[in-house]
Image: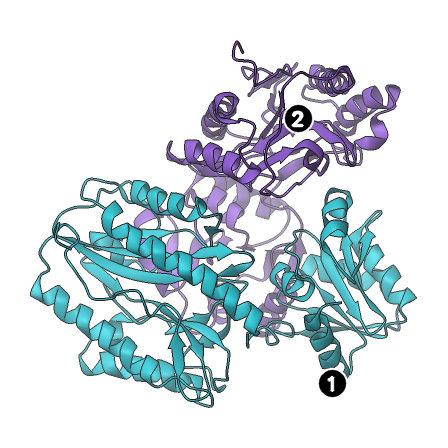
Chain colours: A purple, B cyan
Amino acid sequence: MTHQIKLLQNKLKQENLDGFLVTKDANIAYLSDYDSKESWLLVSQGGSFFITDFRYILEAKKNLRGIEVVKTEGSIFGCVAKLVNKLEIRRLGFESKSVSYAEFKSIKIELASDVAFISTFDFVESLRENKSQVEVSKIRKAVGINMKVLEFAKGALKPGLTEREAALRLEGFIKSRGADLAFDTIVASGPNSAMPHAPLTSRKLRLGEPVLIDIGVAFQGYRSDLTRMCFLGRIPVSFKRIYDSVLASQEAAIKNISAGKPICDIDRIARNFLNKRKLGKFFGHSLGHGVGRETHELPSISSRNKERLSSNMVFTVEPAVYLNGKFGIRIEDMVLVKKNNCEVLSGALDKSIKNWTNPSY
Amino acid sequence: MTHQIKLLQNKLKQENLDGFLVTKDANIAYLSDYDSKESWLLVSQGGSFFITDFRYILEAKKNLRGIEVVKTEGSIFGCVAKLVNKLEIRRLGFESKSVSYAEFKSIKIELASDVAFISTFDFVESLRENKSQVEVSKIRKAVGINMKVLEFAKGALKPGLTEREAALRLEGFIKSRGADLAFDTIVASGPNSAMPHAPLTSRKLRLGEPVLIDIGVAFQGYRSDLTRMCFLGRIPVSFKRIYDSVLASQEAAIKNISAGKPICDIDRIARNFLNKRKLGKFFGHSLGHGVGRETHELPSISSRNKERLSSNMVFTVEPAVYLNGKFGIRIEDMVLVKKNNCEVLSGALDKSIKNWTNPSY
């Protein structure tokens, strides 16, 4: 059995549950140390059960330790109910954000009438918020590849390439290192950079325009997410001024990160900084998000989050300014919270804005 | 407004609903002709509304025609309730497989007490089952690229390459054509091929072993899914015999496909064929699945599906034999149902088993 399942079993005791049905892939992977699909995990004090079908049985048995592999015959819902009955579970928690309404109904029908089926939120996700040393070292590996691909971008992006072609070069770099993409790559040129989640297009990179590169790496189950900007050609003063404001707002926020600080304060510091320069209204999303087994996970670094930072949280810090029809600027790094400050995991990656067509660069 | 939204509006009338909340990405894409993320679509006789947040507003407005773009302020649930109220919707359908239990609860709380919130299954999915001519031509494009990559594989796969490296070459071929992967590529060598959904490993392709390649293309919103086998070196008679059985079972099934036939019969024909050769017990999944905007969609070609085939359904036919610890064999093509027969969309792709290390091949 894994250390993580023990953490969950302890939490079940505290919350007066005697069983928990895990349906979210990332939570199953975290608890079992095994990245699976279309399978569920049932955890109780009496044991843990990985419930899967014919297609995944062989692979699951090969990879799981201390977790019994159960093959569904008929419906997965009936299989869950049988196990719940056998284990004499009377209070069964479930993940209300990762069970569809149809699944909820199907499980409820199969469960004995004296079993309470109890809706929970972020029950396993909150265990995942503070990373173990093993997890941090895996995240460092993903960040390492992510920094390398953004360094590589300097030489790989040229005027005339389409956004799609540029992304393909970057993605090839990641894949050739045995890693995968954490999410759809953004290479947004000129006015496309004003869309926070710009899709790749066949627009060509042009001289005299900025390019926003937001790219993520998935490696051995853990992820990274970084954004850098470049400029193709001489950088206009107006662009440079806003770029420097976004960068300074990011630095102000990072300087204030340490265990114990209210999360909303960190978002506010970056936002106030941009507000003072009349740029706050162009920053429409929250400052950042946790990264780990998922690209977006807890904690959410937003003005609405009243929780406090704690050690070993890992998240992005990504202030931005989006000027519709003109351009957008976003700078995104990943930090690891420490007792008295934070470590910028991507700190070695240059973030000054430069002319990438300058051969001396 | 799109033709597809008109189809849905007609179905709403038949089913006595005056509004429908679409939460599944593939259904939203089908109805709106626009591939989006993290957004919902509300359809009523009084109009259609694309509900999204700050991040996607610009792109949505640029791409949608005849559908009003609504920006969520606060929660998306409150935004839905406001629209439902404004449109005087009293019977609102929702997709019970694509709304989480948590979302269901959050919407229910926001809706006025006289609004019936009605659970539906496959409401839009069943509209998508029979493809339009435009859809078929898009699927043909994806299948075309998919056939080319499997032809390319003949020259690209060599003993000594790892499964991961081999997959990377195939994926590069697809991406360089402006297309994307429909799903995680399977390149399963030797005993790994006995896992129906084998993950990529760093196992090297070896002489004297089969390789199973299951790869899919996503192009302009539509998908394809094909599997071919190759053998590196001289093919053992025992392997060839089973390969020929799987192929013959596929051909027997395909010969019987036409509009009006019960779907379970098609599955049974392939399964009976393998049973007669004592191979049926090694074929643990259903015969196939619909393909379109999703890799897996309706119809499910299984022994449990009592529905009948109808014209313009598109699905895979993929009988298989998995011998645990030894090897697996799967052959997968895509067909288009016609009145009196079917067209094998991937029919031009050779499926005889050959020795790929033979330079004359």
* Amino acid type at mark 1: Gln
- Front position among marks 1 and 2: 2
Which residue is at a point 58% across and 15% down the rendered structure image?
A350
| Crowding at mark 1 (Cα within 10 Å: few <14, some 14-19, many 20+) | few
Parent chain of label 1: B
Give SS at disc 2.
strand
Is residue B122 shown above or below A116?
Answer: below
Q: In the displayed structure, would residue B198 be above or below residue B244?
A: above
- Residue A234 shown left or right of residue A223 in the figure: right
Question: Residue B9: which quarter of the image?
Answer: bottom right
| Residue at the (90%, 71%) spot, across then down | B88
**Residue B324 visible from this viewpoint:** no
The one nearer the camera, B214 or B74, is: B214
Q: Residue at x 25, y 76 (%)?
A: B280
Q: Left or right: where does residue A104 sit relative to residue B247?
A: right
Could you tell me which chain the residue with mark 2 belongs to? A
Number of residues whose C-alpha sits closer than 10 Å to that of mark 2, classed few (under 14), some (14–19) or many (20 or more): many
> What residue does disc 1 label?
B14
In the rendered structure, which amino acid carries the disc numbered 2? Pro
Residues at marks 1 and 2, CA–CA distance in whole angstroms: 52 Å
Instruction: Give coordinates of residue A88: x percent, y percent.
Output: 51, 63
Q: Residue at x 60, y 74 (%)?
A: A109
Residue topped by disc 2: A210
